[in-house]
Amino acid sequence: MAAPPSNEPANLKVIALDGPAASGKGTLARRLAAHYGFAYLDTGVLYRGVAWTMIKDGVDPADAAAAGRYAREFSLKKIEGAPIRSREVGAAASKVAAVPAVRAALLDFQRDFAANPPGGAAGAILDGRDIGTVVCPDARVKFFVTASPEARARRRWLELRDERPDLTEAAILQDIRERDARDADRKDAPMKPAADAELIDTTHLTIDAVEAAARSLIDGIFRRRRG
Ligand code: CDP
């Protein structure tokens, strides 16, 4: 029998989930990971972690050479419990993420997670911006999850409003537009759907509907490839 067209072991299942900020990919990824018993990696944490560590040390996240150094020295241990979800860290993350040396330094960790899912899980699900295009181009299933900028701004505003009552939905929409532009326009690993990704627009869908659609596609693909 011919070998499968993949660098991954034939029995390993990898799901790549890409899309812009607040598109619902994180929630979908967590639900799919729980349903299939897969290990989950939110790759945004790595870029946010590098950015947060620089800010904490008083280093400008726009300093590309410093960002490369911080990424090479990065470990998840260093950011345990750190407030990486803030608006400021998100904006700084998209700056460090445009630096090729940062992306190169974080690549092996992500690929290793996909190839050797922690806890002996039967598969891995990674979410980010370039999982289907660069990190795991051989992933068995690829999704690009999107929603209108306005719907995404509303979701992020609802998430943040208790902690940051001063933030308006309009300011968040502006952040989202700026981050989308930086992520999509950068030269190295820009945010874009892989040619073979399934597109899901969540603007008018509930999370239950999104999960059902994703699961039916995944089940079809896994069944076709016989598990
Ligand atoms: O949670 P949210 O969707 O707002 O963002 P995130 O996934 O935590 O990512 C934060 C930033 O990291 C993004 O705006 C990207 O610039 C960058 N990122 C990336 O470049 N590649 C990835 N695979 C994941 C995140």
Image (spheres, grey):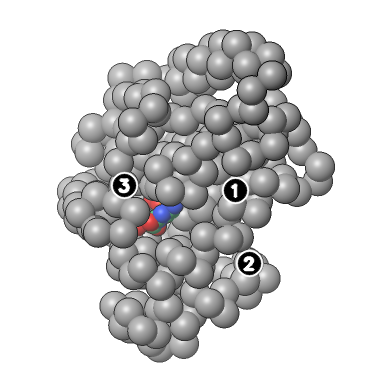
- Return the disc, 2 or 3, that comes first in the chain's sequence: 2
According to the picture, the residue beneath numbered tag 3 turns out to be: 191
Q: Is residue 48 left or right of residue 140?
A: left
Label placed on residue 122: none
According to the picture, the residue beneath numbered tag 1 turns out to be: 41
Alpha-carbon span between mark 2 and mark 3? 23 Å
- Return the disc, 3 or 1, that comes first in the chain's sequence: 1
According to the picture, the residue beneath numbered tag 2 turns out to be: 76
Which residue is found at the position 64% from the left and 39% from the top?
Answer: 8
What amino acid type is highlighted by mark number 2? Leu
Which residue is found at the position 63% from the left and 16% from the top?
Answer: 225
* Vertical comparison of 51 with 30: above or below: below
Question: Is the shortest distance between ligand 1 and the CB of mark 3 under 8 Å?
Answer: yes
**Neighbourhood count class around disc 1 (C-alpha, 10 Å): few under 14, some 14–19, many 20 upward:** many
Q: Going by the picture, which residue comes out furthest to the bottom?
A: 58
* Vertical comparison of 138 with 110: above or below: above
Alpha-carbon span between mark 3 and mark 1? 17 Å
Alpha-carbon span between mark 2 and mark 1? 12 Å
| Frontmost residue, 208 versus 8 | 8
- Assign a secondary structure to mark 2: helix
